[in-house]
Image (cartoon, coloured by chain):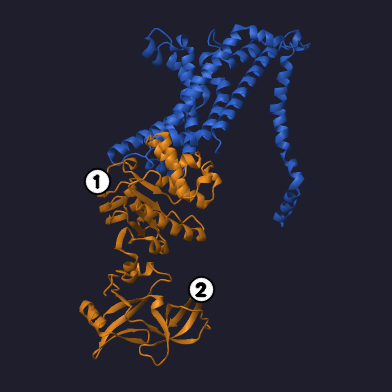
Chain colours: A blue, B orange
Amino acid sequence: MRARVLDKILSFFEGPWARLLMFPALAFMGIFILFPLVWSVYLSFTNYRLTGPEAVNYTFVGLKNYLKLFKDSEFLDAIRNSFVFTFLSALVGQTVLGLGLALVARMKEPEGVLGKVLKILKIVTITVVFISWVIPEVVAGYAWISLTETGGFFSTLFMGPAKSFKFEHPMETIIIANIWRGTAFSMILFIAALESIPSYIYEAAEIDGATPWQRFRYVILPLLSGAILVDLILITIWTFGLFTLVYIILGVPFRTMHWTIYVYYKGIDRYNVSLASAASNIMFLIVLALIVSYLVLMRKLRRWG
Amino acid sequence: MSTIRLESITKIFPPNVVAVDNVSLKIEKGEFFVLLGPSGCGKTTTLRIIAGLEKPTRGRVYIDEEDVTDLPPRKRDIAMVFQTWALYPHMKVYDNIAFPLKLRKLPQHEIDRRVREVAKMLRIEELLDRYPKQLSGGQQQRVALARALVRNPRAWLMDEPLSNLDALLRVQMRAELKRLQKELKITTVYVTHDQVEAMTMADRIAVMNRGRVLQVGTPFEVYHNPRTIFVGGFIGSPPMNFVRATFDKVGENYVLRFENVSLTIPSELGKHIENRVGTGSEVVIGIRPEHISLASAEEENAIPGEIYVVEPLGTETILNVKIGETVIKMKVLKELILPVGERVWIKFDLDRIHIFDPKTEEAIV
């Protein structure tokens, strides 16, 4: 009886009324995603600040904030640093390493004792990589501080006992830390993608005479292109927008300012919300352009899809 | 054209599943050799061992008398057609066929010439510019064959290549494949569970069950002289009838008794059985449906029964006749619809019966 009532209610929502069901989700997204976006665009054209007279009586100032940003060498540095950081830690580090680990994870071990040892090594490695991803970001940040401060393991190993690795090489520090932390995601994604390629495709390539490298280059890699695209899109967004790990490790540094730190610094530290909004919007456009270019590139590569 | 030889191949999958049990085979040059058996009998594993996709636990594999047991598949120069055809989804048909040649770094014009040649042979020229996804099953099958053909491999290995096609296409491809193999004289090892495919295509058949090769022979031999109950029952459609009977000697005559029936068999056959197992012993009679005919009551050795089920097949009819508690299938070469329950007399062609030992399941005669 109850099932029948439920059926009646549900069948009402078939057809044109089905769209009504999307309303709660749309309202949620409108309030928490679309509105802040529009609001930040609006603010970026004003002189709004968190404190002082402009907090109450702010006025429209046109492109003034944007022009100011393009003259600010600190901002231009921050953009460049974010690009370098994203390119090296995410695109090169996490994707390549993640793919490598996924391939290792899928590899068949030889029979015998050696195979068993390799299998245990493999499981340990994958577990460790995975743990680095699930521990809280703040904890991970402090762990890296303790490694890279004066007297820390990394510092002592590379710089001697008197120097700090993170002070001398701030960019390298956050790149390594982010590769360490984020690789697991790419690895898991690629393991899943590799699972979805049926084994007879590998075997056919083997029979057709492909060496392991040729199998990777001509069969596995093209078949993974969809997964690689998804991975690139996600980690580009995440890494450009990464705040916690970078902020915990470096704070607000004098050099090697990351874009998110710049926005935080200007908006929260210096109360200049309108300028910070303008900086956010510029980055939004840059990331959007990157993702569109990935999609275009992938469309060209994956005509068979 | 190559020979393939398997020497005491055993494959054990951990922990202790014996997939292939001490198999030795010799496949001759240009032969169409079929591995036939039910699923799980080890035929596909045997094929994969020849291909190099599996390593045997024991035993050696020779191609042209060269020991290839430890060589990876790419160094064996064999081609394989998979059940699923295993086309590369990201390559066009042309590139799928050209792939083995590209890997061998042949000059571009040579690759092009060969790809177009096989495409013409298999009538898929107009498909070269398509992706596998845009092809029908039969077309994909042809592409897989073309890819296996294009580089003149030492041998063709086929793992149920027709089983994913619909029935009509399967019959059509069966003949085409056989003709192609005869034309090119490529040594072929073909795995199937379909005894009709095996009978129609093979030069020789190896019947496998539970990892063992039970019998190797031409389709004719395997059909007419099955060495075990399993082989007799697996080959032929409908399968051979098996009846448990007692073998005895009454005066000068040898008889087989089952249900309420007593068959007097030719004395030569009787002597043979007597020499092998002695009188009074249990045997299994095997007789093919086409070797049973309708008879009249007064004929010698006529067996009374009643119609249980009638299966008309157009030009022939399969009658299921109940004798006591035993149901016997027989084939008559005409349309014959008898009412269920009708009393009939049937007769075995005693020159064509097979006698098996119920304990070893092996043929006595």
Residue ID at (41%, 91%): B297
Residue A43 located left or right of residue A282: right
Which mark sits nearer the N-terminus, 2 or 1?
1
Residue ID at (41%, 76%): B289
| Residues marked 2 and 1 touching at CB (< 8 Å) | no
Q: Label 2 marks which chain's residue?
A: B
Crowd class of label 1 (few under 14; some 14 to 19; many from 20; radius 10 Å): few
Kind of residue at disc 1: Asp
Q: Residue furthest bottom?
A: B298
Query: Is residue A35 depicted above or below A247 in this figure?
Result: below
Where on the picture, by quarter, is residue B39?
A: bottom left
Query: Is residue A73 depicted above or below B61 in this figure?
Result: above
Q: Residue B185 placed where, x, y %?
A: 34, 53
Crowd class of label 2 (few under 14; some 14 to 19; many from 20; radius 10 Å): few
> Badge 2 is on which residue?
B313
B65 vs B240, nearest the viewer: B65
Q: Residue A134 placed where, x, y %?
A: 50, 30
Where on the picture, by quarter, is residue B364?
A: bottom left
Where on the picture, by quarter, is residue B323?
A: bottom left
Q: Quadrant of the C terminus of chain B?
A: bottom left
Q: Label 1 marks which chain's residue?
A: B
Query: Is residue B364 depicted above or below A65 in this figure?
Result: below
Q: Residue B40 placed where, x, y %?
A: 38, 57
Q: Residue B55 placed where, x, y %?
A: 30, 46
- State the CA–CA distance, disc 2 to disc 1: 50 Å
* Residue B193 at least partly seen: yes
Res. B326 mark: none
For label 1, the SS is strand
For label 2, the SS is loop
* Residue A105 at least partly seen: no
Kind of residue at disc 2: Leu
> Badge 1 is on which residue?
B67
